[in-house]
Amino acid sequence: MKFTLSWLKAHLETQAGVETIADTLTRIGLEVEGIEDKAKALSNFIVAEIVTAVPHPDADRLRVCQVNTGTQSLQVVCGAPNARAGLKGVFAPPDTYVPGSGITLKVTKIRGVESNGMMCSERELELSSESDGIIELPDSALVGQKATDALGLNDPVIDVSLTPNRGDCASVYGIARDLAAAGLGKLKDGPAASVAGTFPSPVKTGLDFSDEAKDACPIFAGRLVRGVKNGPSPEWLQRRLKAIGLRPISALVDVTNLLSHDRGRPLHVFDAAKLSGNLRARLAKDGEKLIALDGREYTLDSEMTVIADDANALGIAGVIGGVETGCTESTTDVFIESAYFDPIRTARTGRTLGIISDARYRFERGVDPDFVIGGLELATKLILEFCGGTPSEIVVAGSAPEWKRSIAFDPSAVRRLAGLSIATEEMVAILRALGFAVEGTGPLTVMPPSWRPDIHGSADLVEEIVRIKGLDAIVATPMSRPETLGGTVLTGAQRRVGIARRALAARGLNECIHFSFIPRAHAALFGGGDDARQLENPISADLDAMRPSLIPSMLAAAQRNQARGIAHLSLFEIGAEFSGGTPGAQTSVACGLRAGTLPRHWIKGGEINAFTAKADMLTALEAAWGQTVNIPAMPSAPAWYHPGRSGALTMGPKALAYFGELHPRILAAFDIKGPAVAFEIFLDRIPEPKARDGKNRPPLDSSSFPAVERDFAFLLPSTVSAESVIKAAKTGDRKLIDDVTVFDVYEGKGIPEGQKSLAISVRLQPREKTLTDAEIDAVAEKIVAAVTKATGGSLRG
Amino acid sequence: MSDLNALETRLSEEIANARDEAALEAVRVGALGKKGAISELLKTLGSMSPDERKAQGPLINGLRDRVANALAARKSEIETAALDNRLASERIDITLPAQDVPRGTVHPVSQVQAEITAIMASLGFSVAEGPDIESDDYNFTRLNIPAEHPARQMHDTFYMKPQADGSRPLLRTHTSPVQVRTMLANKPPIRIIAPGRTYRCDSDATHSPMFHQVEGLVIDESTHLGHLKWVLEELCSAFFEVPHVAMRLRPSYFPFTEPSVEVDIQCDRSGGKIKFGEGKDWLEIAGAGMVHPRVLEMCGIDPARYQGFAFGMGLDRLAMLKYSIPDLRPFFESDFRWLKHYGFAAFDIPSMEGGLSR
């Protein structure tokens, strides 16, 4: 919403300057987005007269002018075709910044002739795109005067960003009313005097709606004005419209634009000669077509309201008029339409057709239902003033929608909600200044004015009072501390997420955050891509599927980095993967990826393999869980992993984690170079810690007798897992065996085809006495027997 | 007597001349071995008369002790020299790089969320969460956003394809549905923050279709706008790590709050870089207000008895402001260089006692 300072002052009697007004507007909830002050930006430009203009000796199109600036006479080279002696124009002296061309002028030589400044076109002053000739000012302009004064540009333009509830301030008058209530001045008289009609309107208005749709347009008023003479509107009106970025068209059209911005009352003026019979508001027919004032043809549907005559739809109600019945220079009889259109339907129509207009902006926020006739009278008055003519009586179909309502208001609500002490009398004064009717003392009965459809309850009234009083009055008030410190702030799950994050970062992985939606083709590689997980309206075609796993996001990131020449990277993300398209069909996952060859190092031995991912996974899982994880890995990771080099940790029917090398087919799909290993931990599936007897730890079980380690190497079929060997070895003596670890695995030369050598170290921890050699040998024998029985292998000699 | 002196002189020379442990051992055997010169002398003590023994005993024993000490001292010298020699040959180039220990990082959004959590926890707030995919009911209806509100349209909100059950869920456009869920599941008093991912159909230089919000909600019988202002002042001064942040409330409009305010904090943009807690400029930092009575009602809370405030702010934006990160979009692009440059060390865990940042 834009307006000029002088326009505001047409409605508001105030001494306040533009800064105070802007500050007040923002303070009362009408946020000032900007103040455009041409007088400031163009302060160097002055009125000057060309005294002589002779052809440039060296260029046909240029003229050498002597310019009188009021204080001196300067030589200026000018290329404008209209540069001539006696022209009064706008002069920019050297060192002036010219906004339209973005340069700062210097004294210069043009084809050998010195030029001291510039005579300017409208484009150079950013007044229009006109650059064919220099500005010609009327004779009344004074040489040496500021150009902005001569051009009538000394009027700052204020731009207010309106919140959607404040349709009443989509008008300069409404803004003046709010400012007056805030104590910044006095609102000048508003309501328009009625203009008596001298004959019955030959064009009638009608409402043609079914009962269900009758809210679409409850009132449709109008009147005919005969014998108008259309032409340019007065200078002051044109200046106002131009200042807010509108193009003056003709007096008849400019009046409607003025009322729209000045009073928030959109109107339409039909050329009555082009109408067939009477006018009515009705719903459009499906497929009905209309060419609008923007020159485009729109296809309407039966949810949209139109204004129609007996033959055709003439305009889209509340949105835009039609071109067929618009006013032209030759229009002599006009029909002025003023109606109320349903905000919701108007908004929907505008949205469906993609039309943004000043009318729509106001109707969808709700225009004043009590100003349908008032607006019509005001428009009549202006048209008579500018174009002459004779008005008919007013015709009205329907009646204004009911807007009167009363709200019970306990003044203590202001203290209760805002923490502010304001005397009831002051509250009443504020409400009345805003146009509310207030009755009663103690509990009040408040009736909002017709232009405030946004006010419904007590809290709304508190807001009105507080915003006009000023939110600066609100004092920061400490809150009481919570009753106890016993409760935890984070849930167990939240803590686990935080710990997993720190553990992974500590292992050298870099945390990323990726979009929750990925290309459908990527989702399909990870068990997703079904319709239920598709977005109806993705931001782009390749961000259309809710991700079924975090790995595709990570691989895409790795690919982008590899393309930038980063050969190796290790990333992790903690976020949701989606198993469906409904609320709750998501699981929190910690996912890591290491991809690409490690940089070479003079200390050899670093390599990325499935066990790197296993260690990453176990580090995070154990940190998050808060305990050692002894769940054996099973070869049951999903299809995006290498089938022979990946594993899963499961608890009951569900996987707790996956890890391993990624499938070469997946790596190829993402164009990843070098090896890539990944893991996924399903954080939501980590069990809550067992409820224990308080926080007591069990006593330490430490033996004072020396532990003994014995090594065993077995020759085994290749398919036998280390896990089964360890498990079997432990059965050798469950009490005595403290730990079994694998310290060597070998396949190849010296070992028969299809077999492998696996060496374990067994740690025996006696608790009652030191072990004798015989006792150790006995346990060793049992271990060998258990392993060979369980695995079909043998002890290597 | 002179025999003993001569022997001691010889042995002393031999000890001093011994170059390695083997030579020294030969000297020791020659002197103190079974048949060594001193051992032989000691053997003669047994056949001496008591008087003679009394005179010779101390002399011979004294000789033995001095020679033994000299041997030990020389041995130590030889060992030290040998060790020095060995160490001299064991020199490495200590300027060679050690094994790589890659420095992992925590994403700025995670870090800032942890900072906000630490601050708000100290004010008695706990953390609530909810799903990314939400129902229309929780994301809009119960927040008093009417069916025709522009925010509900396809150009603002991501919708899922119709589901098997006929529903048409959406990606939450704010974390406010977590407030709805919290109010439906809990009785007042309520004091929570709700951080998380949010989604809007917006993508340009300053908007990302996914971003992060943190919202706060307090519901009890007496909390008012003054408390809101205090909490946000505490939050902002703690977050930006300045003693005090001047704050300005401006009236605004949100369907789910009444009165609604926008919150500006004092800042200084004069130096090209933004500074907080000083200056004459204002920066919008949050939207807030008193929870709308209709929202309370629709979330099962009696608006005649309970009231409270809600606020919302952008986590990504807070990170950008505090740590001078210029652009939003790289937050989600995982450029390795960006992650390392703007990320935080694993053990820089924000806390009120240890400080939010270094």
Image (tube, rainbow, N blue to C red):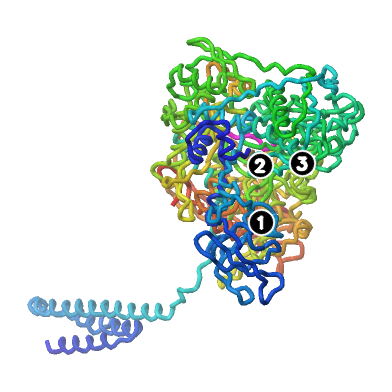
Query: Which quadrant, please, contains the N terminus of chain B?
Result: bottom left
Displayed quadrant of residue A129: bottom right
Spot occupied by residue A356 in the image (x, y as percentages of width and height)? 74, 39
SS at mark 3?
loop
Of circles 3 and 1, the one toward us is 1
Vertical placement of residue B242 versus A510, above or below:
above
C-alpha distance separating marks 2 and 1: 20 Å
Vertical placement of residue B15 versus A467, above or below:
below
Spot occupied by residue A78 in the image (x, y as percentages of width and height)? 64, 66
- Label 2 is found on which chain of the structure? A
Q: Do pointers 3 and 1 mark residues of a single chain? A: yes
Q: Amino acid at mark 1?
A: Arg
Which numbered circle lies on residue A123?
A: 1
Spot occupied by residue B122 in the image (x, y as percentages of width and height)? 44, 36
C-alpha distance separating marks 3 and 1: 47 Å
Residue under label 3? A535
Q: Main secondary structure of the magenta part?
A: loop
Q: Residue at x 92, y 29 (%)?
A: A311
